[in-house]
Amino acid sequence: MQFPNIDPILVHIGPFAIRWYALAYVAGILLGWRYATGLLRNKKLWTNRPAPFSPEQMDDLILWIALGVILGGRLGHVIFYTPAMIWQNPIGIVKVWEGGMSFHGGVIGVSIAMIAFAWRNKLDLLRMADVVCAAYPIGHFLGRIANFINGELWGRPTDLPWGMVFCNEQIVKTYGYCPAGSMPRHPSQLYEAAFEGLILFLILRWATHVAKLGNRRGVIVGVFLVFYALFRIAIENVREPDVGMPNFPFGLTMGMILSIPMIFGGAFLIWRGMREPMPAALPAEEAPLAGQPAPKQA
């Protein structure tokens, strides 16, 4: 299959270019924000504990998360995958519109932002993270689709029928040649969009709406960490390692190395949350959101 000739720039407005990659981040943050707000407002999900914070607080938190995603994702990419950029092309660090964001760096950036927000607003960090993690796959799905449109993060060579030659006019225009060569490769960006985006979202949707795991502190975070890491490690086997990465032992890649601790951390959070005593069911009348005063008794 030939990679389609998709222009990574949606439209030019004067000297400015609106890229699919940037739109994916904006849309992912906005849709994730609205989805998380819907979770907080849906009182059927909070049968044993009130919602961890209010929709109004979510409106404030999304700004902190956006900053954490952009700064953490970009710095993580530079530190984990292209450290030579620090001394060879430091101005390139700020060119986020050219691509190059690390999921694991974004997780660190968002974690720091949420820790600061929880401390400032006296909120339960784990329960707050449960809501954020449930919404995250929306943005990840869009981001991987944008990676595909950019013709980047392609997979290893394959002879499978859906193998794709990542070479078109736009790639030649950008690089002067086709970095992926002329051999068919796994469209690993679409694998990640499907598993780390869509399927992970459905798993977390089951956790929030069917199992009602939002009533257990940190379990949804644990489910997110474990399944993301398992999917990422599996797909790393068919994803081409980033240029400049060393040959790690046992066939490991940087993505695998960064994901393995997520499995252990997530498993611990699931174990801890499921062992923690569950509070008694809330009364039939709807409980207030966290941070809001309880209704007066008649």
Image: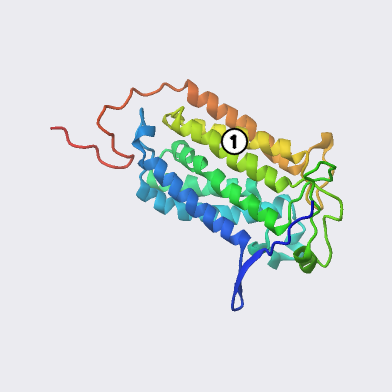
- The quadrant in which residue 278 appears is top left
- The quadrant in which residue 40 appears is top left
Side of 35 relative to 136 (left or right): left
Q: Residue 32 at what x, y percent from top left?
A: 49, 48
Q: Residue 262 at what x, y percent from top left?
A: 63, 35
Mark yes or no: residue 84 visible.
Answer: yes
Which residue corresponds to the image point at 68% horizontal and 39% vertical from the top-left?
232
**What's the amino acid at mark 1?**
Leu
Which residue corresponds to the image point at 30% horizontal and 27% vertical from the top-left?
282
Mark yes or no: residue 218 visible.
Answer: no
**SS for tag 1?**
helix
Side of 212 relative to 111 (left or right): left
- The quadrant in which residue 91 appears is bottom right
Side of 24 relative to 55 (left or right): right
Nearest to the observer: residue 141 or residue 216: 141
Which residue corresponds to the image point at 65% horizontal and 66% vertical from the top-left?
9
Q: Which residue is mark 1?
A: 225
| Quarter that holds the C terminus | top left
Could you classify mark 1 by the number of other residues whose Cα lies within 10 Å: few (under 14), some (14-19), or many (20 or more)? many
Q: In the displayed structure, would residue 225 be above or below residue 240?
A: above
Q: Residue furthest left?
A: 298
Side of 294 relative to 128 (left or right): left
Nearest to the observer: residue 197 or residue 131: 197
Q: In the displayed structure, would residue 59 be above or below residue 127?
A: below
Q: Residue 1 at what x, y percent from top left?
A: 79, 51
